Structure formats: C-alpha cells, structure tokens
Image (tube, rainbow, N blue to C red):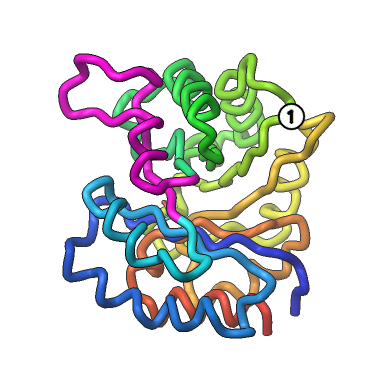
Amino acid sequence: MTNKYMYFIANWKMYGNTKSLNTLDKVIKFSKSKEINKGRLIYCPPFTLLSSFSKKFQNCLIDIGAQNCHESNDYGPHTGFINSKMLKNVGANYVIIGHSENREKGETDKIINQKIQSAIKAKLKIIFCIGETLKQKKNGKTKSVLRKQIKYGLNKISKKTNLFIAYEPVWSIGTGKIPKMKDLEQTVKFIKSNFKEKKPKILYGGSVNPNNIKYLKTIKELDGFLIGGASQNSKKFIDIVKKTYN
Ligand code: 13P
C-alpha cells in the first residue's frame, strides 16, 4: 500500500477515434471518487483527439498530454508536423518526448533536446523517455546508454526544469515482460543519481498491467507509470490505479 502522490499516464499511441471518447466515462467517474485523491491521471491521445479529450475532461481533474512535438517552437513550413504552442493551444499540459518508438525511426538525442527546449518555451511539462534495448542490456550497457540519453537529451536544459523521466526498457514495451524488481530498483536509483540538484519524477513504462502492478508498486522511488496497451481499456487502467493504492 502506498500513500504517495502517483502519476498514471496513458499513452494511447496510434490508437483511438471519436468513438473512443465514450469509453472515458468510467474513468471520469473514477477520477471524481475518493479512491484517486492521491494521484493524477493524464491521457496522451493521438493529436487528432487532443481537442475532444480536452473538452471531455473539462469538469474533472484528468489532464492531457501529447505524444510528440516538432523541435521548432515557431509556426513554419513543416508539412504534417505540430509544434508545442499548438499543443498547448488545444489543452495539452504535458508532452512525451524521446519515446523509443521514435528513437528507432531516427530521432536523435540532439533532436530530442531541441524538442525539450521548445516544449519548455510553450510551458508544457515534459515526459522524457529513456531506455535500453535488449542487446544493450545483454551487453551490460544499460547504465551507459541511460547516462548518454540523459546527458545529451538534457544538454543545456535548466536544472530547475520540472521533469518526468519515463524509464521504458525497449525490450519491455508491448512484450508482457518487465524487469526484475531488484534491477528496476537499482536502475531507478541510478537515473536519480544523475541529477545533483532538482531530482526528476521517475515513471516506469513497459507492459504495465493490472497483474504486474503489485510488483511494480513496491519500487518506492517510482512516482508513477507510463502505460501503453492497458490504458486503452478503461477498466484495466482503473484497476492499475486502484491496485497501486491497495
Ligand atoms: P505498453 O504498456 O503497451 O508496453 O507500452 C509502454 C509504452 O510504450 C508507454 O509509452
């Protein structure tokens, strides 16, 4: 049982359409109940649904985030892209940056760093994703990979920035596998040790579900979870929250 203020962030990835809005009623009702008075629910739907989610959550405390942004904070000729000002304009308060699914497609630490800078200018809160691949883990490179992602991703970013770091081992995303609790505990401590001044909030992401949350919630240093697949099912999402507190 935890008494800590925890963040439950739903990353819907490239799923969802206007019909999905109906599935949120259950979560809205839950968000108003006493069971969640110690935590924060945040939905990161695809860009196309940001505006409707924002309207849907008008009268409750559920917050909204986007899944990415362009590295430029200005308007400009970038066909198919969206900047952080535009996200703020439709109600987003958070943005996920550096997700491994984008890193895999060529998003570099440098671009990630520029995106973080632009999101700070737009006053978005940043959910900065880091994590090692299976190969890197097997080669004992986890710490050096994370250190590098933190160093370059956060280059010249003010130490005072309000940051969420989502530790998402790439081999855990969508696979049903989660790290051994001892390893996870050490990794979370290691991530925090990279910050001398203001410590970021640390989230875990990768196959979080209503069954394994009983293990994950035992990691005291965690401030919450970034949840993919299970977050698209309101019942599962609510179960994860409830089980974190029970
Ligand atoms: P899954 O929960 O589906 O493994 O996805 C995790 C994730 O990538 C969240 O950003």
The residue at the point 54 percent across, 28 percent down is 120
Q: Which residue is mark 1?
A: 160
Residue 213 percent location from the top left of the image: 58, 73
Q: Amino acid at mark 1?
A: Lys
Quarter holding residue 47: top left
Q: Taking 117 as reference, is 226 above or below it?
A: below
The residue at the point 66 percent across, 75 percent down is 37
The residue at the point 61 percent across, 77 percent down is 36
Q: Taking 115 as reference, is 94 above or below it?
A: below
Q: Nearer the viewer, residue 80 or 132?
A: 80
Q: Taking 114 as reference, is 241 above or below it?
A: below
For the image, the number of numbered tags is 1
Q: Nearer the viewer, residue 159 or 32?
A: 32
Quarter holding residue 187: top right
Span colored in magenta = 64-93
Q: Nearer the viewer, residue 100 or 92?
A: 92
Point out the quarter of the image occupied by ligand 1: bottom left
Tell me the quarter of the image containing the C terminus: bottom right
Q: Is mark 1 within 8 Å of ligand 1?
A: no
Is 82 one of the magenta-colored residues?
yes
Judged from the image, the secondary structure of the residue bearing numbered disc 1 is loop
Main SS category, magenta section: loop
The residue at the point 48 percent across, 30 percent down is 122
Does residue 54 appear anywhere in the picture? yes
